[in-house]
Amino acid sequence: MAGVDRWTLKPIDNLSSTLQSVEVILSTDIGSRVMRRPFGGGVAELLGRQLAPRLFAVVQQLIGTAIDLWEPRLQVRRVTFAGSTDEVRRGTATVLIDADYRPRGHLGDFTVERNISFSVSFAQGRTSTSVL
């Protein structure tokens, strides 16, 4: 056991805990945590802006940087968008992330166990992850 699921309160393994942490990071607005102001993903602040290739590049960079800063068990290799611009206009976006999984990274051991790919979906104010 590595943690507790934030929705079911059942024990979860280390990888599930890591993905749950990514959900929390990306769904938290920067500056919203009183005792840890810099924590968060910064993605929500960009929602509602006019779609442009530059905006997609900024979102990709924000996601990669936020995960690298706040989740030591992952080292991001690539962030790409899945789906169409119509889905984004409707308020749904899916991001595919390739990362090195370092299960003991939070303990200072940055040995890579394996490379993982997972998706992060943003829809109607909720963020969810799933391993590919």
Image (spheres, rainbow, N blue to C red):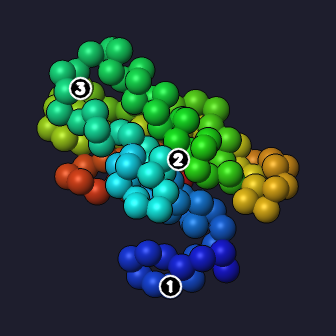
Marks 3 and 1, the one that precedes in the sequence = 1
Whole-percent x and y of residue 84?
Answer: 27, 28
Q: Secondary structure at mark 1?
A: loop
Work out which residue is located at the far top of the displayed protein and give it.
53
Q: Residues within 10 Å of mark 2 (few under 14, many from 20)?
A: some
Marks 1 and 2, the one that precedes in the sequence = 1
Q: Residues within 10 Å of mark 1 (few under 14, many from 20)?
A: few
Q: Residues within 10 Å of mark 3 (few under 14, many from 20)?
A: some
Work out which residue is located at the far left of the displayed protein and give it.
90
Marks 3 and 2, the one that precedes in the sequence = 3
- Mark 3 belongs to which amino acid? Thr
Q: Which residue is mark 2?
A: 118
Work out which residue is located at the far bottom of the displayed protein and give it.
10
Q: CA distance from mark 3 to mark 2?
A: 20 Å
Marks 3,2: beta carbons within 8 A: no
Marks 3,1: beta carbons within 8 A: no
The residue positioned 55% from the left and 35% from the top of the image is 65
The residue positioned 76% from the left and 55% from the top of the image is 105
Whole-percent x and y of residue 126?
Answer: 28, 57
The residue positioned 38% from the left and 49% from the top of the image is 31
Marks 1,2: beta carbons within 8 A: no
Q: CA distance from mark 3 to mark 1?
A: 36 Å
Q: Which residue is mark 1?
A: 10
- Mark 2 belongs to which amino acid? Phe
Say the numbered circle drawn on residue 85. Answer: 3
